[in-house]
Image (cartoon, grey):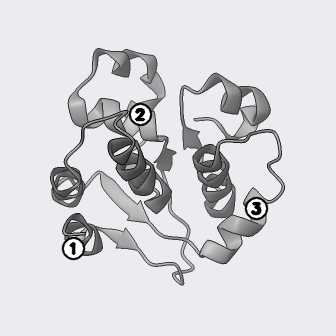
Amino acid sequence: MAWYAHYVTAGIVAQNETYKIMASVLLDTHVLLWILTRSKRLKETSWLSRFPRWLISPVTLLELKFLDECGKLQIDMINVTKKLAEDERFIVDDPSLEAVFKKAMDLSWTRDPFDRLLVAHSLVREVPLGTVDGHIKHHCPSLIA
């Protein structure tokens, strides 16, 4: 698990810190991938420029690893975590896992555990979720960036 060494040295917001993360947005996995690959689909994220800091959930890193292991995506996690650590716009945000799971328990509208945990993370931190996912937008319109 060598990629994790880069992750722990990135700009991480510890789970026990109580300050509010201002002017930031929690990025959905797709949006993070588009940023990292400079995808043309970034034009779907006009809201992105409103936020100087982009939060990344550990859930997103796990989803990327999962997609790589399933063969749905080829990604070098060492390179991803290195890019996150080098770009000061990114903050790997690590809220209380217990708080995220408590929020996630009430999100019965999805069977996707990663979506459920990302939405819960956004609710716990009280920050908008940057996503283009129609299912999330439909069920959480007030949460969307």
Name the kind of residue labelled 3 in the image: Lys
Q: Secondary structure at mark 1?
A: helix
Q: Secondary structure at mark 2?
A: helix
Q: Return the residue at label 1.
A: 5
Where's residue 94, x and y in %? 48, 70
Circle nearer the N terminus (1, 3): 1
Density class for disc 1 (Cα within 10 Å; few <14, some 14-19, many ≥20) is few
Seen from this angle, which residue lies furthest bottom?
16
Spot occupied by residue 54 in the image (x, y as percentages of width and height): 39, 49
Labelled disc at residue 103: 3
Query: In the image, what residue occupies the spot 54% across and 33% down?
Result: 131
The foreground one among 14 and 114 is 114
- The CA distance from mark 3 to mark 2 is 22 Å
Check residue 31 in the rendering and tell me which mark sits there, or answer none: 2
Query: Residue at coordinates 23% horizontally, 53% vertically from top-left?
Result: 77
Please tell me how crowded label 2 is: few (under 14), some (14-19), or many (20+) other residues with Cα within 10 Å. Answer: many
